[in-house]
Image (cartoon, helix red, strand yellow):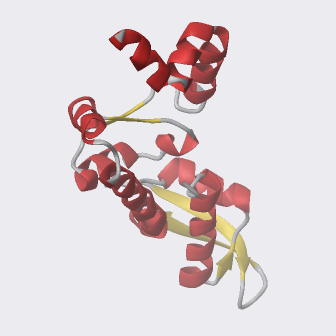
Amino acid sequence: MEIAGDELNKNIIQYARDHFNLLIGEKIAENIKIKAGSAFQMTESVSVEMRGRDLVSGLPREIIVTDQQIRDALASSVNTIIDAIKSVLEVTPPELVADIYERGLVLCGAGAQLYGIDQAIAKFAEIPVRIADDPTTCTIRGVSILLDDDKLLNEILLPSANEEKMVR
C-alpha cells in the first residue's frame, strides 16, 4: 500500500496551500498530524497552530486549524487505505476471511497511530480492528522472531510442504 505517514503529511501541506494560501513544511505538517490528525471524530475537539509563508504576501503567517479540518485533509488517504483493505479482503480465501472476521485485523506501522484509524476501518470494512501494542516496531520484531526460529520460518515459507507432511 502506498499510503504512509509521509503521504498524510503531504495531504496536510496541500490542504494548507489550497484552503489557506499557506505554504508549510514537512515538520509542521508532521506536528499537526500528531496533534490533530484523525481518521474518525475525536472525543474532544482539538485546535492547533499552523505556521508558514503566506503565498500571496510572501510573509510569515499563523492560522488556527481544527481536528475536523485536518481530518478533511486526510480523508482521501484514509479512504484509499480502507478501499485497499476491502480490495484485499475481496480476493482473500474464504477460510482466511472467516478468521479475519472472527479475530479482526491488527494494524501496525506508524500510520496505525493516527487517531481513529482503527475505528474508521472497522466501520467501513465491517470487521473488528485493533492496533498492535507497539505498532512502529511490531513487524520488525516479528521478522526477527521468524529469523531466529528455523522451524517456524519453514512452516510459514513452505506451508504446502508442511501440509503434505501432516497428511502422511
Q: Nearer the viewer, residue 114 or 160?
A: 160
Q: Nearer the viewer, residue 96 or 62?
A: 96
19 above or below 110? below
Residue 84, x across and y down, in percent = 42, 57
- Furthest toward the right, the residue is 58
Q: Residue 67: in sight, yes or no?
A: no
> What number of labels is visible?
0
Residue 37, x across and y down, in percent = 48, 54
Tell me the quadrant of the picture where the C terminus can be found. top left
**What residue is drawn where x is 42% and y is 69%?**
72
Q: Nearer the viewer, residue 90 or 53?
A: 90
State left or right for residue 85 relative to residue 6. Answer: left
3 above or below 22? above
Q: Residue 111: in sight, yes or no?
A: yes
- Furthest toward the front, the residue is 168
Locate residue 144: give its quadrant: top right
131 above or below 118? above
Residue 52, x across and y down, in percent = 71, 70
Residue 99, x across and y down, in percent = 26, 31
**What residue is drawn where x is 59% and y is 53%?**
4
**What residue is drawn where x is 39% and y is 48%?**
117
Q: Nearer the viewer, residue 123 or 27?
A: 123
Locate residue 50: give its quadrant: bottom right
Tell me the quadrant of the picture where the N terminus can be found. bottom right
- Furthest toward the bottom, the residue is 56
